[in-house]
Image (tube, helix red, strand yellow):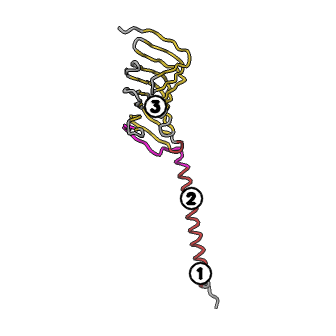
Amino acid sequence: MISFFPSKHFAISLLLLLTILSSTGSILLSKSSKQLTATNQAGQPDAYMENIVATITNKQGIPALKIESPKMIHFANDDTTYIMRPRVTIYRQSPQPWYINSDYAKATHGIGQIVFSNNVMIHHPFDVANPNTTMTTTSLTVFPNKQQATTSEAITITQPDTVVHAIGMFANLNDGTVKLLSQAKGDYVPST
């Protein structure tokens, strides 16, 4: 009599082979799914925050920087944070901090560099060493850890009785010195 049922060893071998193929297929599908997910998420934000008030302190626990914004979006692939309508306070050694506002900002490498854009205003209230100062420009790059700010764009600086227009500026935010880079022109505007 001819049997259509394979031997017991053949059945076990076939079952083992099917199990191995099933496991291999599952592993391959899992890896391809993870790669597809990683590829799809490369341009996607990994975090966002709304209504932010964040104070960053130095090693001694003293405030060094405060960031306020209605919305921030972070992208992990290039460690970049986009900040909408930022209001940034940079504390320094003197009693009065610097205040920087704009429509947008982009922070890279944590807060190592912040680029402010559109309607940028920098303000420093009067203190013992510096007069009340307001600067406006279209773009400003700030290095909070170095207490420095720079722009290559047109800038207007307003102090009591004085308005100065220039192209480009470098500021040491710690001691309040401002270096105008080119085409500086000042106007005496007496207060009334």
Q: Residue 105 at x, y = what percent? A: 47, 32
Q: Identify the secondary structure beneath mark 2.
A: helix
Q: Residue 120 at x, y = what percent? A: 45, 25
Instruction: Quickly name the residue at label 2.
Output: 31
Front label number (2 vs 1): 2
Most extreme residue toward the right, as rendered?
A: 2
Q: Are discs 3 and 2 less than 8 Å apart at CB?
A: no
Q: Is residue 128 above or below residue 25?
A: above
Front label number (3 vs 1): 3
Q: Identify the secondary structure beneath mark 1.
A: helix
Q: Which mark is residue 11?
A: 1
Q: Please tell me which residue is depicted at 45% across the width and 23% down the height of the picture.
A: 176
Q: Residue 98 at x, y = what percent? A: 41, 27
Q: Which mark is residue 104?
A: 3
Look at label 3 and name its amino acid.
Tyr
Q: Identify the secondary structure beneath mark 3.
A: strand
Read off the magenta span: 39-55
Q: Earlier in the sequence, mark 2 or mark 1?
A: 1
Q: Is residue 42 above or below residue 14?
A: above
- Cα distance between the residues tagged 3 and 1: 68 Å
- Asked which quadrant contains residue 48, the reply is top left
Q: Residue 14 at x, y = what percent? A: 60, 77
**Mark 2 crowdedness (10 Å alpha carbons): few <14, some 14-19, many ≥20:** few
Q: Earlier in the sequence, mark 3 or mark 1?
A: 1
- Cα distance between the residues tagged 2 and 1: 30 Å
